[in-house]
Image (cartoon, rainbow, N blue to C red):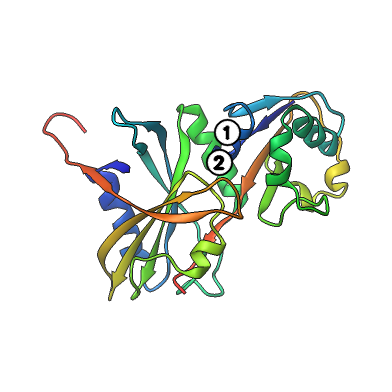
Amino acid sequence: MLKLSETIYNALRTHGEETYPHECCGVLLGRSYQSADGEGVNEVEEAVRAGNTRTDSAHNRYHIAPQELVRIQRQGRERGLDIVGFYHSHPDHPAQWSKTDFAEAHWLGCSYVITAVASGVAQQTNSFLLTGTSEDDKSFQDETIQVEELVAGRC
Amino acid sequence: MKIFIPTPLRVYADKQDAVQVNAQTVSEALNALTSQHPDLKKHLYSDEGKLRAFVNVYLNDEDVRYLPEKEATTVTEGDSLSIIPSIAGGQD
């Protein structure tokens, strides 16, 4: 399960609208744990926007510079947070992982969040957990997104 | 020096997010890491013994593959290595 606040959920969707017709991308910082009923949870505390280095083909490709990941990881570490996932958008394309998404996915145990953005408006957002123990047996598993609504007086 | 382990590889490093090693060069540091945690080796290196293409190693904020001495670059106790698997994709 991917757990995140309504604020973060809206923020990653809005990012895709802002970069349309190009793919947006970003990093999800938070904590991974097992819930009381044994389900794996990636709980997001912060979504950090990242630059898409694929300026040659940004309408259908994204890449986050490793140097930026080093910086974001350091930023997370200072707050006691880990990288628990990534998000990107699919302009005028379904919120489903592609063969490219799969081939380029290497962060086992992390959530890959995809938002379909049609004509500049965010549509469906789906999350996929990258499961497996290695490159040889990795697979994407559909994952529930639990959006925590804002409660008056606290986030 | 410290080597920061990315989330997906921590299970092979006794669940640690960082490993302390003694080394004079980047190469020595990575060898020390895989000596301490042998299960990491196949996730970092191909069968030919080269770092997998999607595995990026940063010495502080510099990509090791672009340093003049590459993995022979000398390191000090205050340096850190970060192992960063690539993140990329696309809609088709």
Q: Residues within 10 Å of mark 2 (few under 14, many from 20)?
A: many
Subunit bearing disc 2 = B
Camera-nearest residue between A96 and B56: A96
Is mark 2 in CB contact (under 8 Å) with mark 1? yes
Question: For this view, does A138 lie left or right of residue B21?
Answer: left
Subunit bearing disc 1 = B
Q: Are marks 2 and 1 on the same chain?
A: yes
Please tell me whether residue B34 is drawn above or below residue A102 in the rendered image.
above
Q: Give coordinates of residue A51: x percent, y percent.
A: 50, 57
Camera-nearest residue between B38 and A111: B38
Q: Amino acid at mark 1?
A: Val
Please tell me whether residue B65 is drawn above or below residue A23 in the rendered image.
above
Q: Give coordinates of residue A116: x percent, y percent.
A: 32, 67
CA separation in Å, label 2 and label 1: 7 Å
Residue at image point 30% right, 51% down: A11
Quarter of the picture holding the N terminus of chain A:
top left
- The residue beneath circle 2 is B8
Please tell me whether residue A37 is drawn above or below residue B64 in the rendered image.
above
Camera-nearest residue between A112 and A144: A144
Residue at image point 84% right, 47% down: B70
Q: Quadrant of residue B29?
A: top right
Does residue A63 appear in this view?
no
- The residue beneath circle 1 is B11
Residue at image point 21% right, 33% down: A155
Question: For this view, does B22 lie left or right of residue A10?
Answer: right
Q: Name, please, the residue furthest toward the left.
A: A152
What label sits on residue A149 in the rendered view? none
Q: Amino acid at mark 2?
A: Pro
Q: Secondary structure at mark 2?
A: helix
**Mark in front: 2 vs 1:** 1
Question: For this view, does B16 lie left or right of residue B22?
Answer: left
